Amino acid sequence: MTAFDYRALDEVIHGRVRLAIMAFLTGARQSDFTELKTELDLTDGNLAVQLRKLEEHGHVRIEKGYLGRRTRMTVTITPEGDAAMAAYLARLRTLFPDI
Amino acid sequence: MDADRIDLEEAQLIRSLVEAGRRVAALDGSHLLGWGLFAALVLALQYCAEVGDWMPSRVLWLWQPAALAGFVLSMFVLRRGAGRRLGNPVSRAYTAAFFAAGAGLCIFMLASTVAGLPDGRAAAMLLAGAMGGAFFVLALTARMGWMVWPALGWWGLLGFYAAQSAMVPIDWLRLAAACALLLALPGAILLREGRR
């Protein structure tokens, strides 16, 4: 066991795809399903599963509506998600101070 | 991604994704950079017109359209950021902050023109206050803490003009420097961050 305690990392954010979603939303604040899928190069199924998990833990808020005739799923990072991401990055900084 | 696989490459990936998100929100800085440089140039020309007496300075009032052009163009930041979507809250906040500032300045200029009492000092104070407010709103909504510094800079300028009794020609150069430092420079910083 190193001095770095991996158990302190937020497991919800720690998944590669979920981390990518959260990092992207940290910058964009809000996105939609299509944009996330394109920007992060994900499949519909994978993105939907990961978003559901993030929503269950309160990291993102998902709203469904319409843009013209098409359905539109808007994804917004929540204050809890912001705090969780900040805490996650703080943990990483204990390993890499230049992050 | 196991804990023992976290490395600098992962850290760089996180950073690049955060920046990609910011780019989607259209805060790439080009609007601020272009506006700031254009306004600084126009204000410097205004100064030349005042001191050189080779242009009708009272008629010119170039700085007002230069300022307003930037406010109007801020609307297109939202449109560009929206793309196929309805818009991003950061770009909406950006547009709302600068558009509100521009609308306030425009109303003041119209009112003072109608009243026949053009007051450059009051307009400069309003401009500085509005710009400071816009940057402060942006700092809060975009979670870019460093944006507070340009806000404080503009408010410092507001305080300076509040303490003055009237505008003098050198004030055009002061405003030009303010536009370069407090408008164009934040835009350049945003651009640099986006490309990193």
Image (cartoon, coloured by chain):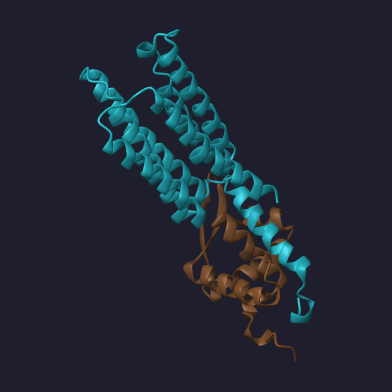
Chain colours: A brown, B cyan
Write the residue at 63% across / 77% down. Answer: A91
**In terms of image quadrants, where is residue B33?**
top right
Q: Is residue A70 visible from the viewing direction of this image?
A: yes
Above-or-below relation of B175 to B50: below
Count of numbered circles on the image: 0
Residue B172 position within the rendered picture, expressed as x and y whole percent measured from the top left: 42, 26
**In terms of image quadrants, where is residue B96?**
top left
Above-or-below relation of B141 to B108: below
Above-or-below relation of B192 to B141: above
Write the residue at 70% across / 57% down. Answer: B16
Quarter of the image where the C terminus of chain A is located: bottom right
Residue B57 position within the rendered picture, expressed as x and y whole percent measured from the top left: 39, 13
Write the residue at 65% across / 70% down. Answer: A50
Q: Is residue B107 visible from the viewing direction of this image?
A: no
Name the residue nearer the viewer: B74 or A89: A89
Residue A18 position within the rendered picture, expressed as x and y whole percent measured from the top left: 66, 69
Name the residue nearer the viewer: A33 or B122: B122
Residue positioned most to the bottom? A1
Name the residue nearer the viewer: B180 or A22: B180
Write the residue at 49% across / 19% down. Answer: B45
Q: Is residue A37 left or right of residue A63?
A: right
Quarter of the image where the N terminus of chain A is located: bottom right
